Image (cartoon, grey):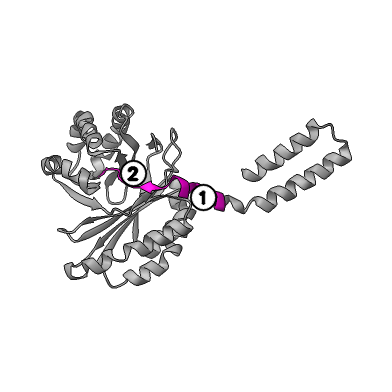
Amino acid sequence: VGFFVLFTATLSLAMFAGATSGQLRSSVRRAASFARAIAPRGAIIRRCMATNARAQDKRVSIAPYFTVPSENMAKFKALFREFYKCVDNEPNCFYYGFTVDEKSGVVFNRECYDSAEGLIKHIENTADVGAQAGALCSDVRLEIHAPKEEAVKLEAIAKEINAQIFIMDEDGFVNNNMETGKPDTSVSIHPYFKVAEEKWDAFVATHPEYYKLVKANEPDCHMYCFSHNKEAGIVFNRESYRSAEALKNHIENTKPANEIADGLFESVDLEIHGPPAELEKLEGVAKEIGARLFVADPDSRVYKQ
């Protein structure tokens, strides 16, 4: 895209100036040469933009895992549009969209809010359609991921809906580079690390190495933040990327940190969520790392940064 814009702009200027055919051909060659020369700088520009927009991730998310019997799956999916209608009127929501693992019959929802109050309003706003969806499930697992100060405000409702609370690490960040007002085409990986109590502190101590690598080398990362439920011995990472290629880059980029963390956790459950076209590019990686694939609903949407 950048090449085409630069090429066209330079060519248009030459034509506007009344260049002869020979001069025009020369301008075309110069435009193409110039555009090719600066094209590699696109990644550098994106990295600078990500750095400038980066902020501490203080957002609140609820992570619902709906186990849906096969005979109810079509009915459950038919409710997606009703959820979207509700959320379209929620100014506190950043992004919202369903993903589905057809093989295991599990539906997930990638959703995020600006505060504890925003999440509570969402739960109240979707209560009716949520009850219809719940009636179609054989099981529902709920998690809430929030900064400590927001998690305190959510303790009562977490108890009411039987949700586990994960406290977000203060060094987690968001790059504010998702495209608002458009479908959510991001690719996210969901790692759940099971960590023994005696190795908990050592594992958490590896977080800075991951943050350092991601900040330095991954301009197409949308967000990256560890969250903890020490009582359950689980460490999660809320992380998302622009594309399959960006996720592959992340996996390669964080190998040095993985080597440090190796042996500090008992097991890790992995999921990859994203559009079908992106997941197709990740099938080999998913098989290699043992990750389940969740296909994103095309109506998933990004509301704001």
**Is residue 106 highlighted in magenta?**
no
Q: Is residue 156 above or below residue 87?
A: below
Can residue 265 be seen here? The reply is no
Q: Secondary structure at mark 1?
A: helix
Q: Residue at x 32, y 71 (%)?
A: 262
Reading the image, the residue beneath label 1 is 48
Q: Amino acid at mark 1?
A: Cys
Q: Amino acid at mark 2?
A: Thr
Q: Nearer the viewer, residue 290 or 96?
A: 96
Mark 1 or mark 2, earlier in chain: 1
Question: Where does the image place residue 292, in percent across and percent down from the top left?
Answer: 33, 55
Which of labels 1 and 2 is toward the front? 1
Image quadrant where residue 82 sits: top left
**Is residue 57 highlighted in magenta?**
yes
Which dot marks residue 99?
2
Q: Nearer the viewer, residue 221 or 45?
A: 45
Do labels 1 and 2 touch, CB within 8 Å?
A: no
Q: Residue at x 32, y 35 (%)?
A: 93
Q: Tag count in the figure?
A: 2
Q: Residue at x 18, y 70 (%)?
A: 198
Q: Residue at x 25, y 34 (%)?
A: 118
The quarter in which the C terminus is drawn is: top left
Give the class, few, some or many, for how many residues have Cα within 10 Å of label 1's Cα (few <14, many ≥20). few
Range of residues picked out in magenta: 43-62
Q: Nearer the viewer, residue 151 or 289?
A: 151
Q: Is residue 67 above or below residue 271?
A: above
Question: Where does the image place residue 42, in percent across and percent down from the top left?
Answer: 58, 50
